[in-house]
Amino acid sequence: MGKKIFATLPTPQSLRVFVDEESIQSAVQRHPDCCEPVRWGAKVLGVAFDLDVAGHELVEEYLTQAWASRATPRLLAQLDSRTHSS
């Protein structure tokens, strides 16, 4: 996958996931107790999850989305085959 960063863990309690603007807005609106926008100056780049509050399924959903937006077609096919065989 190269050097394409899709998430960072700046502290043990905070996970930053880099997704599109629509996904950021959705996460912040649907889960204001555990999500906030990640800003770099005036630009919003992702969503920060409070891992002490956010559920596993929510974090997995956004991590998968961020990874898939940067993955190669071959890796996406592998994920798809694993998902459909479960």
Image (spheres, helix red, strand yellow):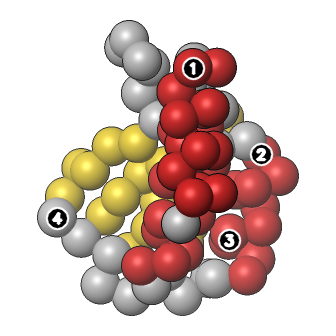
Q: Are marks 3 and 4 in contact (CB under 8 Å)?
A: no
Query: Which image quarter is the N terminus in?
Result: top left
Compute the Cα span from label 2 to label 3.
11 Å
Mark 4 or mark 1: which comes first in sequence?
Answer: 4
Q: Residue under label 2, please give it.
A: 21
Q: Which one is in front in this view, the residue at disc 4 or the one at disc 1?
A: 1
- Image spot of residue 38 (x, y percent): 53, 50
Compute the Cα span from label 3 to label 1.
31 Å
Residue occupying image coordinates x 73% and y 81%:
30
Give the residue type that dot 4 points to.
Answer: Pro
From this viewpoint, is residue 82 visible? yes
Q: Which one is in front in this view, the residue at disc 2 or the one at disc 1?
A: 1
56 over 75 or under it: above or below: below
Give the residue type that dot 2 points to.
Answer: Glu
Mark 2 or mark 3: which comes first in sequence?
Answer: 2
Residue occupying image coordinates x 53% and y 66%:
86
Q: Give the label on residue 74, or none.
A: 1
Tell me the SS state at disc 4: loop
